[in-house]
Image (cartoon, rainbow, N blue to C red):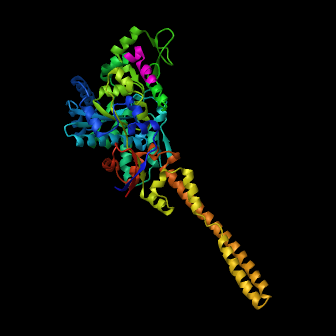
Amino acid sequence: MFSSTEFLPLSLSPLVRDYLAGTPALESFHTGIPSLEGILASASNRTFTASQRNLLVHTLRKQYQNLPVAEPVSRNIELLLQEKVFTVTAGHQLCLATGPLFVIYKILSAIRLCAQISEADCTVKMVPVLWLATEDHDFEEVNHVYVQGKKIEWQHDSGDAIGHLDNVGLQEAIEQLITSFPNVPMRQIVEDMLRRSSAEMRYADGFRMIIHELFSSFGLLMMDGDDAALKASFAPYMRRELFEEIGNQYVSKTSSDLTARGYPAQVNPRSINLFYLSEGKRRRIEKNALGKWAIVDSAISFTSEELNLLLENSPQSFSPNVIIRPLYQEWVLPNLAFVGGPGELSYWLQLHTLFAAMSIPFPILVLRDSVLLLHNRTRQRMAKIPLSVSELTRDRALLIRALADESGLSDLEQEKTSLTQIFESIASKAKAIDATLEGTAKAELQKQLTALDQFSKRMMKASKQKEELRIGQLEKILDELFPEGGPQERHDNFFDHAIRAGKWFHEDLIDLFNPLDARLKVLTFE
């Protein structure tokens, strides 16, 4: 499927780069740098009670009731009842048609890391999990996808949690998406999957269906934290957040400590890091001047007694934000490692002391695989310029300038100097024979120099045309590999590349992945 694999350095923030390198200044912000030895060592210390396992498995069974039975998935759900079975987790929002490529890469990285851990120690069984961020409500982050360079957008007027949304307008977006694909055999398979997903009554169910079909053979489990029983088990921690504002207290301190070491904060906590779910809205909770807990942009407020009662009787009304969600995730799952992108790892490093304060184990943080896909036609166009893979990390402007400099057939000054010297020698010899011949020789020289000037202009014109053509080709390649100046994996859609490849190429990626190797993998399609 892939004819070659090459590696390039990743551009990472100083915080992530130093974390991966094991910089001593960051030791107090994590439980260990990513390595098989470190992850396996954490397994011996990871506590997860039988009651937590029972609740987890009961919830997963319920959440999978309406999905087709897949033996690897069913097996992994039941495995979680066993004491020595742990998880590797990645999390993401419910993006339209899976969103950008890196969502797929993140899932594959978690699956691959599970296999690596189990291969290193067969007594430790690992289960990959995708935590579905169904409660996020930033619709603009998930309502679009790019296909063939075109932005397809889903229109929906709602401030509710993404996972609660109905499919109003979704089918129109999917049809627009499908018509953007080239009419090749693989299109029919993608078309069928996307249409079935948009027919689901809830957006979350359609997203789950797609991920299940793509990854059930790997035993991937999807976890939706928007569950009353799970939140009831987490209620003591939410109570501390509501009444002690513990998230703001610890994360602000950790962020200041990181800033003092020269690392800017990725996220900033609020005074209360929980939302309130009601009336089709997800709204912030704030303590007001009257000492009540007020729901922002509403007339709703609670006294401490009312808030305690609500937490006891309706814990599903509370929704963690980006600060508390990692705590909730690690409480729900017997997790050893969290797989995320550079931004995710950055803000998780701000949470270590909060985890300690809450007495919840902090996972090993692992950077997901990053990939640049090169289709054969692109590789062939690169060879004509020529442009090597190693040059792709260079600044765009410098690449274009270097290419322009290579097209340097500009003038014939050296040749004109040589010609002048030759004719001067001829004129000197002619003069010795007949003085009148000297003028003739000089006139002939001028004629030849004029001809060279004309030819030089033609050469310069051809050189400029050639230069413009090559620079145009280079810019097209860079636009394809780095759309809108950013990484391909944060822009392009999986289905777009699958159609071009003619198959579900993620099945071929898994053996090429290694989330413990923080380099960009450049993969060329056969």
Answer left or right for 11 relative to 423. left
Residue drawn at x 77%, y 85% as measured from the top left: 438
Q: Is residue 90 found inside the magenta-colored segment of the image?
A: no
Q: Is residue 126 visible?
A: yes
Residue shown at 49% from the left, 34% from the top: 140
Q: Looking at the rendering, in which quadrant would you find the N terminus?
A: bottom left
Total numbered circles: 0
**Residue 437's image quarter?**
bottom right
Find residue 520 and report its horizontal and vertical position in percent: 41, 47
Work out whether residue 276 can be spotted: no
User: Closest to the observer: 158 or 473?
Assistant: 473
Q: Main secondary structure of the magenta part?
A: helix
- Give the camera-side residue of 401 and 312: 401
Magenta-tinted stretch: 240-253
Q: Is residue 522 above or below residue 23?
A: below
In terms of depth relative to the viewer, which is nearer, 134 or 193?
134
Residue 521, percent from left and from top:
39, 49
| Residue furthest out toward the right | 436
Magenta stretch encompasses residue 247: yes
